[in-house]
Image (tube, rainbow, N blue to C red):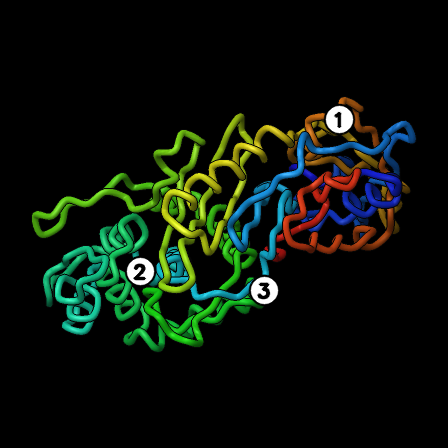
Amino acid sequence: MALGVNFGGRDRRILTRAIGTLAHLSRSLTSIASKPAALAAGFAILGAATSVGPVHAQSTFQTVVPSAILVDFSTGAILFDKDSEKRVAPGGIVKIMTGAVVFDEIRSGRITQDTLFTVSENAWRRGGGPSGGAAMFAAVKSNVRVGDLLIGALAISGNDAAIALAEGVAGTEGEFTVKMNAKAEELGLTGTSFRNSTGFADPGQLTTARDMAQLSRYIIRTFPTLYPIFATPGIEWSKIKQRNRNPLLDAGVGADGLHASWVKDVGYHLVGSAVQNNQRLIAVVMGASSEKVRLEEIRRLLDWGFHSFEHRPLFAADAELARAAVFGGETGSVGLAAREPISLLMPRLSRTAPRARGEGHRGGAAGNHARPAQGAGRAAGHDGGCACGHHVAARL
């Protein structure tokens, strides 16, 4: 587990809140007592070392795109935020949610990747070859595996594949859109509303960079075996070969998925995730003026994030972190330990080793979630602190 922490003049209080707000507490802490009984204990980290002073990221990042966000995957920490709640037409990145809904269906067992869906005349005419847009070129009335339709929709942005998936799952694209909006509400995507599965223009279809980052984090965390579909190199269908349409995959930054789009009068969008040295970041840029600017800005954003922040170990897995008082047990207290290592996300410039102590609590975890960073162009650490303690993702 990695924790994001905010450092500055309020070191002790913010570190207390950031680590004490382990939203994952019940999943991450386990009793190490021999016979725990009636355990209702929480754990909070109550103090950073008093020697910890203000730390800064290596530089204040700036971007020319109208809206952008950079998120540390493991903590949900917002490392950079420029007008990330600006609502814009999404275009084809809508298919990220289309994929999420279908992934849910697969996880539930209602369908599998080998389930066959029929490409209706509606899917073929509106999204296939006759449409003139991005298409998988599946033949009308053909039966296609869900796994292949997912590649068609998520890797090459085929509109026919997206409509076929929607109709196969819900009967009609309209009913599928109801599922998309229900998932958006479940995840807390407050700036997003869906009107179709493809991203076709509709005045009511809007999203934000922040919501796309949050959705991406949900997909990567929840569907580790399905997420790689986004990075499928390409597909050949109806004797037509097509390559993955996500330019970030070939940019040399460790990218492994998600989606790109273009919207008339809005610009070029790109939602991507990359891994370097076991650290995953999620980046979103929206409204770029060209394909070149879109790719360059998201590359710069990811490079800045990887070079400016790192995870520092705090506790080893299975190490006793605290004692918690219990009632009705054979002993008066039990030990609490992390099931996995716990680390802190910190600016690389800081060389101060983090220290913390644990204290037992009856009941739940102490503290509350820190609120996300706000403000256009705000880079974590730009004001003597770090936005690393701020969670972007909904609690899963």
Q: Residue visible at 80% across and 34% down?
A: 321
The answer, for residue 104, to whether it is visible in the render is no
Q: Residue 19 in the image: x percent, y percent?
A: 77, 43
The disc labelled 1 sits on which kind of residue? Ser
Looking at the rendered structure, the kind of residue marked 3 is Gly
29 to the left or right of 258: right
Query: Residue tagged by mark 2?
Result: 111
Quadrant in which the C terminus appears: bottom right
C-alpha span from label 1 to label 2: 49 Å
Q: Position of residue 160 (x, y in %)?
A: 22, 63
Q: Quadrant of the N terminus?
A: top right
Going by the image, does 241 lie left or right of 84? left
First reached walking from the N terminus: tag 2 or tag 3: 2
Q: Secondary structure at mark 1?
A: loop
For the point 34% across and 34% down, which residue is it? Answer: 250
Crowd around label 1: few <14 · some 14–19 · many ≥20 (10 Å): some
Q: Report the side of 193 relative to 138 (left or right).
A: right
Q: Which residue is mark 3?
A: 188
Instruction: Report, in whole angstroms, how far the alpha carbon at label 2 lies from the one at label 3.
Output: 26 Å
Residues 246 and 221: in front is 246
User: Can you tell which of label 2 and label 3 is closer to the viewer?
Assistant: 3
Disc nearer the start of the sequence (3/1) = 3
The residue lying at 80 percent from left, 46 percent from top is: 20
The answer to whether 135 is drawn above or below residue 357 in the figure is: below
